[in-house]
Structure formats: structure tokens, C-alpha cells
Amino acid sequence: MSNGTGTCDFAAARKRLRELLAEKSPEYPAAPAREEARAADRALVQSGALSEAQLCALYSRAYETELVEEEEFKTPEPFPDAPYDFFNANSCLPAEWDADAITFLVVDPYDLEQLSFFVRRTWKTGARFRFVRRTFLERLTSKLQSAGEEEEMAEVEDENMLRSMAGEARIVRLVNDIFTRAIELGASDIHIEPGEESVAVRCRVDGVLTEIISAPLSQFPAIASRIKLLGGLNIAESRLPQDGRTNIQLGRQELDMRISTIPILTGESIVLRLLNQEAISFDLGILGMSPTHLEQFRKLIRIPHGIILVVGPTGSGKTTTLYSVINHLNDNKKKIITVEDPVEYKMAGLCQMQVNAKIGVTFATGLRSIVRQDPDIILVGEIRDRETADIAINAALTGHLVLSTLHTNDAVGAVTRLLDMGVENFLVSSALFGVLSQRLVRKICPVCHGKTTDAAGNKCRKCNGSGYKGRCGIFELLTVSEELRTAINRSASSSELEAIAVKEGMVTLQDDGMAKVKAGVTTLEELNRSTAEL
């Protein structure tokens, strides 16, 4: 079958498409009319039976056309004397043209016959077709319509106008498409940043930022307003930082999002933290610990009282590890209370308190109240200051197991950090029982094995051509022995403390990472990237 010059057998293609869609949904209409077919296709996407990308792939398969890979597609030149009203109304856009035919980007196959007729009548040539996502087509059209024009980004003060812009169908689809693509990539964060000429949308996948979308700068106020409305933020305020949270439903998937905005020179930087409650699994056994580390850590967290710290830089997986510990210890026989900023994951059987500095609920004040609630286990999101550290240590010394985090580079650094806060040596040595230092490293893709391409030489779809898919931890577990307690009491240096710990069998972060490199879990380059500060 050829559809290169308008000779496509549309009837055969439609039949083949219905068969493919019926495989995905037995209830799919047998012979739907044009608008009925569109509605049925949208219903498949909304229900989660198909993603928009998968639907486009089925269109391409049925009509034997090429599918556009957005990441590799360059914005086309404006079509001469382009009737953009017609293109917008028919969801199409000329991408290439020559003497034989015009190649159109289209979002569905239901107007192809009419479009072919229009092309033959208007330009006296044939038509070719390539399928794309609707949101991608709309972004391209916006770019081309504004090409060569002076972009005047005047401030929009009218809140009603912002609300109207945020409610436009194309903006709603664009924002939903950003969320959908982030989920498909397994992203942890979405960064939306206006530049001088366009809006860059980047996703953090396995700890590394990758640009997924570039939108016209003129769309940023509407995009920002849409996201602010979802998070309950003030859409008219762009001069001050704002924070919010929302819960959205995409197909069958429910997603929690933390939203943060800050003013920058070119507008506002918007960052969304994606919290997939269904996808996360708080299991100590899947964090990436070696059998030896896992056995030692499980033994450590069974102590009845004392402090256990998890340390590492931002984004090293400390919160996931703490939740995994809590999940392991949560047997309905213990009272477990947490104070967090913010509460990222809701867990049954816990009493979870959220820090709110505006009304005076800090880690210190929250912790002070918690100890009067007769808890067995206390989780403090982070020890940031002397006051919080003192209360946590006193709680540990009075019969509570306290779990918390610190921002330090290694396990021994947690000791020196507590001392630097002003905590007395004898209190640190008495209360601290263990420190787990960790980093996250990307794992080699199980499909392309780090080669970035598949057997046919195409970009690996599993890892999106990065060579890595998923992450695991590398760990350093410091168990405070009697010799270490003595050394802490006499203010031993960090290097001396580390030497004692290594002598007693502590495996360093670098050594644990090298073991994973030798096992083929990750690469030496990735290990060096993750531990560059050590």
C-alpha cells in the first residue's frame, strides 16, 4: 500500500486500524463514524488502555506511514502562504514538500481523505502523512505562526485572563502531555524554565536532566498558570516563591506532585517533584545493599533505643531508605511517629506530622511534642540545627529509637557534623549507634547493555538511548563500636575515626561501588560521577 502521493487505500487502512484497536478494547465500535472513532480513541487513552504514543504507533502501523520521533525532529520551515486557520482546524501541518507531494504531520487518520482532496485541488500535488502527538503538533504550529514576529512578553496582570489562558484546551493537553511523558520516562522531577526565546521542559531521569519539550515562550504564562491552579497557588503572583501540592489522575495512574516556583530573570522556574504512590516499593531488600550490608543493617535497626542516621547529598535516596526502615519495623506493636518537611509518602499505621514554619511547627517543636506521645520509634526528616539535635539525642537516651538524616559526604562526617553543631562528645558517643551513608548510581540498561542502541542500530527505547535504566544504591555502614565511642569522646579526627571503622570491617562507598562495577551493575564512569566529591 502506498500513501506517498495520495493513492492510499483508506478503506483497507481503516479496517486494519479497527482490528488493531479492537485487540486493545473488545468494546471498540465495529464501524465507527469519524467523530465516534475520535471519541473512542480518546477514551482508550483516558482509560489508560493506551498511551498517546502507543495510539500514534497503531495509526502508523495501520496506515503504513512513518512515525515521527519528536526528539529527532527539527522544526520545519514555514509553508509558503500557509493557511494556518485551515491547518489548525484540521490538526495538520506541512513538514516537507517537493514537486511530487506535501508531507503533512497529522494527529489522527480520520480526515486524511478530505485533506488529500484539498491538497490536490489547492496545490495540484499529492499528500503524504506522518503521525505525531497532538500536543507536539500544536507546539510546532505555535512556533511557526510566531516565526519572524517580535515577541512582546508584556506582563499579564489580569487574573481572569490568566485563568482563561490556563483553561484553553491546547494548554491543558500540553501540560497533561508533559506529565504523561515524564511518567513514561520514569522521571522523578519536571523542570520548566523560560529562556530568552523558548520554554525548556526537562525531566530528571535516574538523576540526570534531559530536555523533552521546547515550547514557544508565548505559552509560558498559560503553562505556569495551569500548573499553579492545579497546585492551589496564586496565579497572579510571579514575584515571590510559592510551594504547593496536588494529586492528579492520568489514565489509570494516580500521581502526587509537589510544586515549587521561584522568580528568575526570564520569568519563573517551576519544578515539580513526582511522587508515584503506586510505583514506589519500600523494601530494604531492593535498595541495592550487599547481603553483608543488609544483614548488618537489619540487625542495627532492631536496637530498642538510640539514633540511627542516614546521610548523603540531596537526591541520594535517604528518604526512601528511611521509609523502607519504617516499613520493615511497622508491625502494629509499636507507636511510630514522624515529623517531616514535607510528608512525601503516606503510610498506614504511622502518625505523620508536617513541618509548618509559618505557624511555628519546626522540626524542634514537632519533636518536642512527639516525645510526649509515648512513641516507640521517631522519624525526624532532617537534623538541621543544635536544638533539633539535642532533642533527638535526649529522646534516644530516654528509650526511643530515633531515625533521621544529615547532609554529609560520608558516614564518619555525621559524627563531626553533630559535634560542629555544638552537641557534647559524650552525648554523641552515647546516643549514636549507626550511620548509613549512601549514593545512587544508574544501572546498565538490561536491553542494550549500555550500548544505547538496539540490535538494529536504532536508539534503545528501554533507556531512551542513555545506556542506563533505573538506579540502585551504594552504601557505607558505620556501626559505632566501643573503640569508636572512646575515640569520639576524646575528639578524634575524621581520618582517625574512619581508620578505626575500616579496621573493624566497614566497607567504604568507593569499595561498595567498585564491587557493583565488577558485578556489571553499573559502570566506572557512573560511579565516578556519583562519588566525585569524595
Image: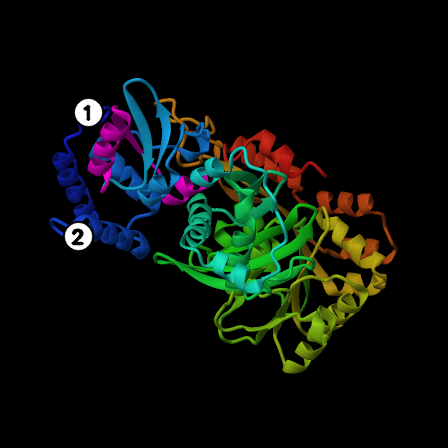
Q: CA distance from mark 2 to mark 1?
A: 27 Å
Q: Crowdedness of circle 1 by 10 Å Cα count: few (<14), some, many (20+)? A: few
Image coloring type: rainbow
- Which one is in front, 394 or 342? 342
Query: In the image, residue 218 lies at what x, y percent?
Result: 55, 45
Helix, strand or loop status at disc 1: loop
Q: Answer with left or right where residue 525 lies relative to residue 57.
A: right
Report the span colored magenta.
110-139
SS majority, magenta: helix
The quadrant of the rendering that contains the N terminus is top left
Query: In the image, residue 436 lies at what x, y percent?
Result: 65, 52
Q: Answer with left or right where residue 137 lies relative to residue 417.
A: left
Residue 422: in magenta span? no
Residue 282 in view of the camera? no
Q: Quadrant of residue 4?
A: top left
Instruction: Look at 86% across and 62% down and name the residue there.
Output: 422
Q: Find residue 28 and name its label.
A: 2
Amino acid at the residue labelled 2: Tyr
- Which one is in front, 23 or 463? 23
Q: Which residue is mark 1?
A: 2
Q: Quadrant of residue 48?
A: bottom left
- Which one is in front, 334 or 124? 124
- Which one is in front, 5 or 265? 5
Query: In the image, residue 10 lies at what x, y percent?
Result: 16, 35
Q: Answer with left or right where residue 368 lies relative to residue 60.
A: right
Amino acid at the residue labelled 1: Ser
